[in-house]
Image (tube, grey):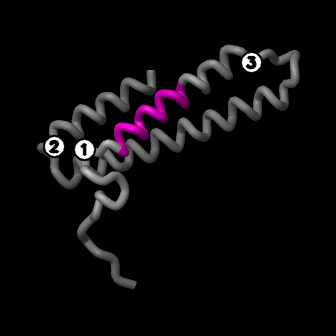
Amino acid sequence: MNYSLTWDLNTIFPGGSHSKELQQRMATLDEQITELHQAVQSFEAEKRITTNLLTILNWNAKVSNGFEECGSFIEALLSADVSDTKAKLLSGELSKKTT
């Protein structure tokens, strides 16, 4: 099987580092982080532990997926063009979300 040595990043998020879809995905990630934080804060071990824990685990999976998806794309942008200043800014924005 032969694979192309050229990446077509526009098939993932059209527009590269200026992609509206990437910005929307990062905004969705912000919302998911908020939901995860709220689920953890409201966790009460004494009450319905299974349901509460399942909610936390589901939100954690969504947040992890968001970080992986956005992070991999931004890393690919920087690998393709190390002078892409917008991609560098996006990388910094994504890093801030981890704190």
Q: Which mark is residue 43?
A: 3
Which span of residues is magenta-colored? 21-33
Give the side of residue 94 with respect to residue 68, left or right: left
- In the rendered image, the residue lying farthest to the bottom is 1
Q: Decide whether residue 25 is among the magenta residues.
A: yes
Q: Split into 4 quadrants, where in the image is the C terminus?
A: top left
Q: What is the distance, in whole Å, between disc 1 and disc 2 at their CAs?
A: 8 Å
Residue depicted at x 16% and y 43%: 84
**Local crowd size for mark 3, using a 10 Å CA cut-off: few (<14), some (14–19), many (≥20):** some
Q: Which mark is residue 54?
A: none
Residue that badge 1 annotates: 17
Residue depicted at x 55% and y 31%: 32
Does residue 86 sit above or below 3 in this rendering?
A: above
In front of the other: 45 or 17: 17
**What amino acid type should be assigned to the residue bearing mark 2?**
Asp
Q: How would you classify the magenta stretch by its main secondary structure? A: helix
**What amino acid type should be assigned to the residue bearing mark 3?**
Phe
Give yes or no for contact between labels 2 and 3 (Cβ–Cβ under 8 Å).
no
- Residue 97: x and y, percent? 42, 26
Give the side of residue 17 with respect to residue 85, left or right: right
Q: What is the distance, in whole Å, between disc 2 and disc 3 at their CAs?
A: 42 Å
Residue that badge 2 annotates: 84
Does residue 30 sit above or below 12 in this rendering?
A: above
